[in-house]
Image: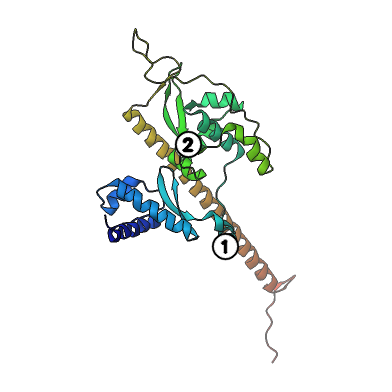
């Protein structure tokens, strides 16, 4: 590929990254740019990333969540924050962060294992994280009841700006990180021992059943049903939120109507003719 072709490919990649709201993989760039070799895409992308980095631009191309995305440069975050004063990224609650941290570091892990570490019921928190697409059901644990086990999603990597799970801070680094931010070290002990997960391929020789404690992937048909149930659950949450907003609007409208009616009644009473013992008397102009 000569220089003119490489420059054209760089322009195509730049345009694709600019219009995409999500990280774009090398294969997606290769298909969209109609290039024969992934190696050419990788080379053009590497050159483009260097161009942005060397020019100190306000935009940077970052490798994130197994893909590449065009984002604002961290060096200019303060200006963006000042510009969007009223915009705030939705923050997770402390229980949600605790649960998410356990799942991220211990995955695949069951809800019971999460509760053993946290010491409290985690039903609602797990469902909240599922609805946020930050975790997913990744299989079943071969213990009595065969509970679901959970893992993190690509959206989790995007939310925290991680290239891969390997980029998560090491547990021993947490005290230093918390000290830098003047925050207390979380009380949740991520080193707590939960039943170890054995690989799926470890089978009992005599009957070829999964060993107790191992993880069995969910069949495709069951996964489809789960996805549909989660979609319906998210839809119900959206509908409930719309109904809640609608009820708030209706109540405000009703209060406004009541206020207007009260005002009209007060004006009418003020303009009402005075009455005597013989009833109301109309005044007429003098002759």
Residue 192 in the image, given as x and y percentages of width and height: 59, 23
State the CA–CA distance, disc 2 to disc 1: 32 Å
**Residue at image point 46% right, 39% down:** 164
Numbered tag placed on residue 119 in the rendering: none
Residue 13 position (above or below residue 159): below
Outermost residue toward the bottom in this view: 287
Tag 2 near tag 1, CB within 8 Å = no
- Give the quarter of the image for residue 5: bottom left
Outermost residue toward the top in this view: 206
Q: Characterize the local packing of mark 2: few (<14), some (14-19) or many (20 or more) Cα atoms within 10 angstroms.
A: some
Residue 79 in the image, given as x and y percentages of width and height: 58, 61
What residue did someone put label 2 on? 165
**Residue at image point 33% right, 27% down:** 219
Q: Is residue 236 visible?
A: no
* Residue 159 vs residue 77, the one in the foreground: 77
What residue did someone put label 1 on? 83
Outermost residue toward the front in this view: 2
Residue 21 in the image, given as x and y percentages of width and height: 41, 52
Which colour style is shown?
rainbow
Residue 201 in the image, given as x and y percentages of width and height: 36, 19
Q: Is residue 205 visible?
A: yes
Please report whichever mark, 2 or 1, sits nearer to the chain's N-terminal start: 1
Residue 129 position (above or below residue 116): below
Left or right of 63 in this view: 114:
right
* Residue 16 vs residue 131, the one in the foreground: 16
């Amino acid at each position: 590929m000569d220089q003119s072709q490489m420059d054209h490919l760089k322009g195509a990649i730049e345009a694709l990254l600019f219009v995409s709201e999500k990280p774009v993989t090398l294969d997606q760039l290769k298909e969209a740019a109609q290039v024969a070799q992934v190696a050419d895409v990788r080379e053009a992308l590497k050159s483009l990333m260097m161009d942005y980095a060397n020019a100190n631009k306000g935009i940077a191309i970052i490798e994130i969540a197994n893909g590449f995305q065009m984002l604002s440069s961290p060096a200019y975050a303060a200006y963006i924050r000042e510009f969007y004063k009223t915009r705030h990224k939705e923050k997770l609650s402390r229980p949600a962060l605790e649960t998410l941290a356990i799942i991220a570091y211990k995955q695949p892990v069951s809800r019971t294992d999460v509760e053993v570490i946290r010491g409290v019921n985690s039903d609602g928190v797990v469902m909240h994280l599922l609805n946020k697409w930050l975790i997913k059901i990744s299989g079943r644990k071969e213990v009595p009841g065969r509970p679901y086990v959970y893992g993190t999603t690509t959206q989790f990597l995007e939310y925290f700006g991680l290239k891969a799970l390997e980029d998560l801070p090491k547990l021993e680094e947490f005290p230093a990180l918390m000290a830098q931010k003047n925050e207390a070290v979380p009380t949740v002990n991520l080193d707590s021992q939960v039943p170890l997960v054995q690989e799926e391929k470890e089978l009992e020789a005599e009957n070829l059943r999964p060993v107790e404690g191992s993880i069995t992937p969910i069949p495709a048909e069951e996964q489809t049903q789960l996805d549909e149930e989660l979609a319906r659950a998210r839809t119900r949450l959206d509908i409930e939120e719309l109904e809640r907003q609608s009820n708030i609007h209706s109540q405000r409208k009703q209060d406004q109507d009541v206020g207007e009616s009260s005002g009209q009644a007060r004006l009418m009473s003020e303009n009402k003719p005075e009455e005597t013992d013989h009833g109301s008397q109309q005044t007429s102009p003098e002759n």
